[in-house]
Image (cartoon, grey):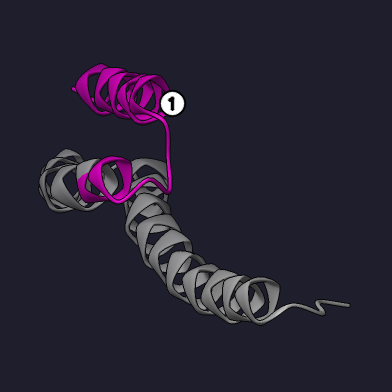
Amino acid sequence: MANTPQSKKRARQNEARYQINKARRSRIRTYLRRVEEAIASGDKDAAATALREAQPELMRGVTKGVYHQNTASRKMSRLSNRVKALG
């Protein structure tokens, strides 16, 4: 367990960041799940709309340090290809 005041503070900060990042990850996954569900239903318009809503959330996750840039780009690329294929 943390003993010095500095390490105690770092432990508190780490827990706070963990909770914030967990909430962000959950929110992003919700948006991605909406796209997946729209794709599964075969509704191209709904899938395209869900994808447009998911993109800023995913990229915000990158700027906040929750996801790596390449990971987010890969996810967006694969989802957009699947939405295009619905046509």
Give the residue drawn at x 29%, y 17%.
Answer: 81
**Residue, far right:** 1
Which of 8 and 14 lies nearest the eye of the viewer? 8
Residue 77 in magenta stretch: yes
Which of 48 and 62 lies nearest the eye of the viewer? 62
x and y, in percent, of residue 31 in the image:
32, 58
Mark 1 residue crowding within 10 angstroms, few (<14) / some (14–19) / many (20+): few
Give the residue drawn at x 33%, y 26%.
Answer: 69
- Considering only vertical position in the picture, is 15 above or below 50? below
- Residue type, label 1: Thr
Q: Residue 34's quadrant in the figure? A: bottom left
7 vs 85, left or right, is: right
x and y, in percent, of residue 70 in the image:
38, 19
Q: What segment carries the magenta color?
A: 60-87
Which secondary structure type mostly characterizes the magenta part of the structure?
helix
Residue 9 in magenta stretch: no
6 vs 32, left or right, is: right
Mark 1 secondary-structure assignment: helix
Q: Residue 77's quadrant in the figure? A: top left
Quarter of the N terminus within the rendering: bottom right
Which of 32 and 23 lies nearest the eye of the viewer? 23
x and y, in percent, of residue 87 in the image:
18, 22
Q: Which residue is mark 1?
A: 71
- Considering only vertical position in the picture, is 52 above or below 10? above
x and y, in percent, of residue 76 in the image:
29, 28
The mark tally for this picture is 1
